[in-house]
Image (cartoon, grey):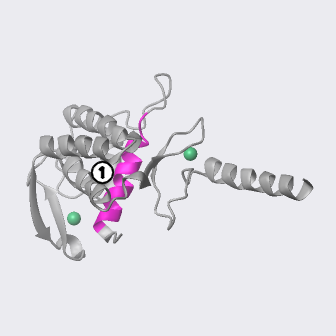
Amino acid sequence: MLITHDTRCALDTVVDLVNTMPEDESAPDGLPDVAALQEFVTTHDISEVGVLTDLDLSAVRGIRGRFAAVFAASDALTAAGLINDLVAAAGTTPRLTDHDGYDWHIHYFAPGASVADHLAADCGMALAFFVVAGEQERLRRCEAPDCRRAFVDLSRNRSRRYCDSRTCGNRLHVAAYRARRKEAAG
Ligand SMILES: [Zn+2]
Ligand SMILES: [Zn+2]
């Protein structure tokens, strides 16, 4: 499956967005205030975003939960329904652009869209292409019991089970090491 640069950016953005969600009610929110949302927008180079408000913050937190559901979807039908709802609610105006020195790519968000609608449209379409390619199962949640972070498995054989956070990456190596030792000992 061909993943273009802008799709890759949208994927990184949506994964990072979902992973700002608190694990449970006692955990801190990764997007606690408008300043944090502003930082998220700047870090992810999200274009055409105006002055952010509390309304933007609550709207972004709202779509964040819906994106999380896409990563938790067990099949393409479920994912497709969720993505359709997200993209339809955002409204889209596909258009070619080469802004800021990037190669030609398509923006799906409507001109003047709120940041939440922008993310719902463009990240929603990035995820839609995975469903189209029959690759919905690459949209995963980490299988470590105390992690559950979202990630996109871009490995050739779709074999990644853990996110690339340091703990989970190590956990994977340790588990593989133990398995090898056990095999050698047995
Ligand atoms: Zn762009
Ligand atoms: Zn993890």
What secondary structure is the magenta-colored segment mainly?
Answer: helix
Ligand number 2: quarter of image: top right
Looking at the rendered structure, the kind of residue marked 1 is Val
> Does 11 sit above or below residue 58?
below
Q: Which residue is mark 1?
A: 41
**Please, is residue 148 above or below residue 185 in the view?**
above
Q: Is residue 186 left or right of residue 2?
A: right
How many numbered discs, if any? 1
Residue shown at the point (54%, 51%) measured from the top left? 163
Q: Secondary structure at mark 1?
A: helix
Examine the rendering and report whether any part of residue 176 can be seen: yes
| Residue 94 in the image, given as x and y percentages of width and height | 10, 61
- The picture quadrant where one finds residue 127 is bottom left
| Residue for point 67% across, 52% down | 172
Asked whether, in this view, residue 10 is left or right of residue 142, the answer is left
Magenta stretch bounds: 6-21
Q: Position of residue 181 (x, y in %)?
A: 85, 55
Residue at 50%, 22% in the rendered image? 26
Furthest residue toward top: 26
Q: Position of residue 37 (x, y in %)?
A: 32, 42
Looking at the image, which residue sits at the far right? 185
Q: Residues within 10 Å of mark 1 (few under 14, many from 20)?
A: some
Say if residue 51 shows up in the picture.
no
